[in-house]
Amino acid sequence: MPLIHPRDALIAEGDAAPALPVCDHYAGVEARMRKSLALQAELGPVFDLTLDCEDGAPVGGEAEHAHRVAELVLSDANRHGRVGARVHPVDHPAFAQDIATLVGRAGARLAYLMVPKPRGLADVERACAEIDHALRVHDVARPLPVHVLIETHGALREVDGIAAHPRIESLSFGLMDFVSAHRGAIPAAGMSVAGQFTHPLVVRAKLEIAAACHGHAKVPSHCVVTEFDDLEALKAAALRAAREFGYTRMWSIHPNQIRTIVDAFAPDRDEIERAIEILVAAQEADWAPIRHDSTLQDRASYRYYWQTLERARRTGRTLPGDIEARFFTAA
């Protein structure tokens, strides 16, 4: 009798979150966008690249910038198909034109579109409707994934409904705009690498976003660390985001942050080896409960270890050849 794959034995339909890379790197200036594409080609699809039409576009040059982004998405430099774009907010005059340009020119190759600054679920629904209209007009058959930045009071109030929306793949926390929306009530330290993990209002926002995402099988993406030269501080923040706050993805705003984030979100070698041992034994027992190192293991823990092994692959960790063949080659 053939062995049952973990995905068939452990994950119910609709329960699996999208398998996104653990790092989302942002670039908006053309030279930096091109350098980021080259780095992605070198490292492989262990990070997503989001080309920024919001903060990256010069005032008055929004249309030209959107066309430039579409060209880069379509170019040979996009080797892995993991390039998305951030558009303007729904109430910005350039929003509809961003969508029309990006979907019309590059909709078949875009990995996702990021929608910033929604004031609530209604803005998200409006954005998704505009994107889906463009997909129909330009005869793009795929349902282009939508990511959303939670950075306003209204979006945080309705974060569960936003996470539940079927077109949403991932929610990100927009730290800087969220802090500034408090009109000075949160001090500037709340945007720092230390303060963003201690100020109660910021901590509350992070936890609500993560909980909403996990409740609806979406990917929570952690906010930026602006101290981009302090890689030890970045590493500490990424570890806390992953291990204490439940985030499975994190923003990068400088190329030297990418490797640190990927390494922090990757399982360590001991975790990978334990996951392999337990999953192999469980599969050979047809996913019935087993004893491993004097502890009971069952389907609840099997799901955890399967997700550990999937994360190892998404972060570029090398698995033994027999394990790669057993669990992933035919998948």
Image: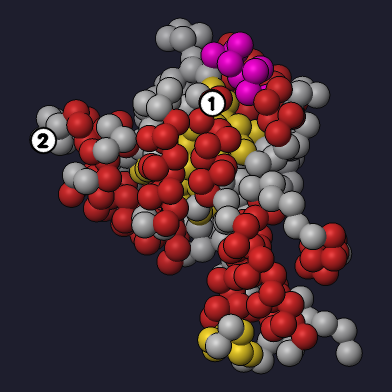
Mark toward the start of the polypeptide (1 vs 2)? 2
Q: How many marks?
A: 2
Residues in magenta, as a range? 29-37
Report the Cα–Cα distance between label 1 and label 2. Answer: 32 Å
Residue 199 in the figure: left or right of residue 224: left
- SS of the residue under disc 1: helix
Q: Which residue occupies 75% across, 57% down? A: 319
Q: Examine the rendering and report whether any part of residue 95 can be seen.
A: no
Q: Which quarter of the rendering shows the N terminus?
A: bottom right
* Label 2 packing within 10 angstroms: few (<14), some (14-19), many (20+): few
Give how far across and how far down residue 76 sits, in percent: 80, 24
What residue did someone put label 2 on? 185
Q: Examine the rendering and report whether any part of residue 119 can be seen.
A: yes
* Label 1 packing within 10 angstroms: few (<14), some (14-19), many (20+): few
What residue did someone put label 1 on? 256
Position of residue 7 relative to residue 104, above or below, is below
Residue 149 in the figure: left or right of residue 14: left
Amino acid marked by disc 1: Asn
Position of residue 274 relative to residue 77, above or below, is below
Q: Which residue occupies 84% across, 60% down? A: 321
